């Protein structure tokens, strides 16, 4: 790795702190883990340090998932204190989301990254358009009761999210909204889903990265401990602020905020897929 000047290292430190604050605020505000910001920033920073191209994306995704673990806990506790977490939905969707996240870690060795970016970018774009409509199409007046349908709805949330290093709110919130879950409750519940996704996903990347050559200093598997520490602390501090902000906005405004967030996320992923 190339040695960087002290001023550059300080700028990188500030960049990591700002990334943590931004991702933590998004985690509380929108029920997402902040990975949509963390992954591309870490990818850029790791590239500056000349890490091996073969593991740079693995490091970015794994570290993002590890960061989302404490961030989602902080965000979920704040939403739970406001009564915005659906315990029934956690019990029915949670196990399938965990399964999807673990399965996603396994599939990451075999699936093409460009294809995943393209698929998720299209899904996020569709969900954004759906939330921007004056009246969102409702598939059901309540979450599905049938076990098979529940599995088909919730498993892809964990699967796609773990492969992309994100907390799942980008998919989980619109999916809940289409099942007539109020937006504030959907956001709060998605914050808990972020933990269900991030923990098995991070553990999977940790295990798969053990013994891999060319990993940077202070790495645990594919997880960069310095980035985890700096961004993680800043994210945990900022998450309650985002949660409080979410509950000061009315439902319509929160829907619009989330729609814009999804639109920007989809554009980012589609452009990244195009550049692969």
Image: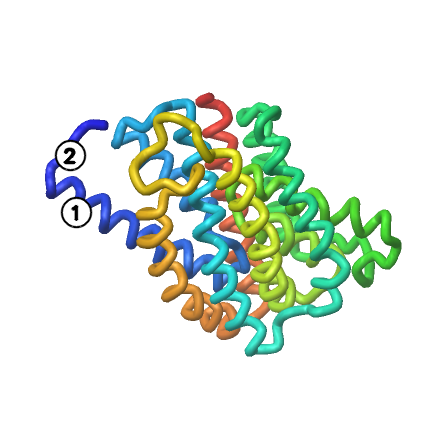
Q: How is the image coloured?
A: rainbow
Q: Quadrant of the N terminus?
A: top left
Q: Position of residue 29 (x, y in %)?
A: 49, 63
Q: Residue furthest front?
A: 211
The number of callouts visible is 2
- Label 1 Cα neighbours within 10 Å, binned few <14 / some 14-19 / many ≥20: few
Residue at 59% x, 40% y is 125
- Tell me, for residue 10, which label it has, or none: 1
Of the numbered discs 1 and 2, the one sitting upstream in the chain is 2
- Say above or below: 60 vs 195: above
Find numbered disc 2 in the image and state the secondary structure of the residue it sits on.
Answer: loop
Q: Position of residue 109 (x, y in %)?
A: 58, 27
Q: Position of residue 19 (x, y in %)?
A: 34, 51
Q: Which residue is mark 2?
A: 4
Find numbered disc 1 in the image and state the secondary structure of the residue it sits on.
Answer: helix
Residue at 39% x, 59% y is 235
- Is residue 25 left or right of 92 when viewed as pictured? left
- Say above or below: 204 vs 168: above
Q: Residue furthest right?
A: 146
Residue at 37% x, 66% y is 237
Marks 1/2 in contact by CB < 8 Å: the verdict is no
Residue at 86% x, 59% y is 145
Q: Position of residue 182 (x, y in %)?
A: 68, 67
Q: CA distance from mark 1 to mark 2?
A: 10 Å
- Tell me, for residue 118, which label it has, or none: none
- Label 2 Cα neighbours within 10 Å, binned few <14 / some 14-19 / many ≥20: few
Which residue is more in the foreground, 263 or 104? Answer: 104
């Amino acid at each position: 790795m190339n040695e960087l000047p002290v001023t550059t290292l300080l700028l990188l430190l500030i960049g990591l702190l700002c990334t943590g604050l931004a991702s933590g605020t998004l985690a509380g505000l929108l029920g997402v883990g902040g990975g949509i910001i963390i992954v591309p920033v870490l990818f850029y920073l790791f590239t500056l340090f000349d890490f091996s191209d073969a593991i740079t994306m693995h490091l970015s995704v794994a570290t993002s998932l590890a960061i989302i673990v404490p961030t989602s806990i902080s965000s979920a506790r704040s939403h739970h204190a406001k009564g915005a977490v659906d315990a029934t939905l956690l019990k029915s969707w949670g196990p399938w989301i965990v399964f999807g996240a673990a399965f996603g870690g396994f599939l990451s060795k075999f699936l093409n990254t460009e294809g995943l970016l393209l698929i998720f970018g299209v899904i996020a774009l569709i969900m954004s358009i759906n939330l921007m409509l004056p009246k969102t199409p409702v598939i059901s007046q309540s979450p599905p009761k049938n076990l098979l349908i529940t599995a088909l709805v919730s498993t892809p949330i964990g699967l796609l999210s773990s492969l992309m290093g994100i907390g799942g709110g980008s998919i989980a919130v619109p999916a809940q909204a289409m099942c007539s879950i109020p937006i504030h409750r959907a956001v709060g519940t998605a914050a808990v889903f972020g933990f269900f996704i991030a923990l098995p996903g991070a553990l999977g990347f940790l295990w798969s990265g053990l013994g891999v050559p060319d990993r940077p200093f202070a790495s645990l598997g594919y997880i960069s401990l310095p980035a985890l520490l700096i961004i993680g602390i800043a994210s945990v501090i900022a998450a309650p602020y985002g949660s409080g902000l979410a509950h000061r906005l009315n439902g319509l405004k929160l829907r619009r905020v989330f729609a814009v967030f999804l639109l920007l996320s989809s554009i980012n992923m589609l452009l990244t897929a195009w550049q692969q």
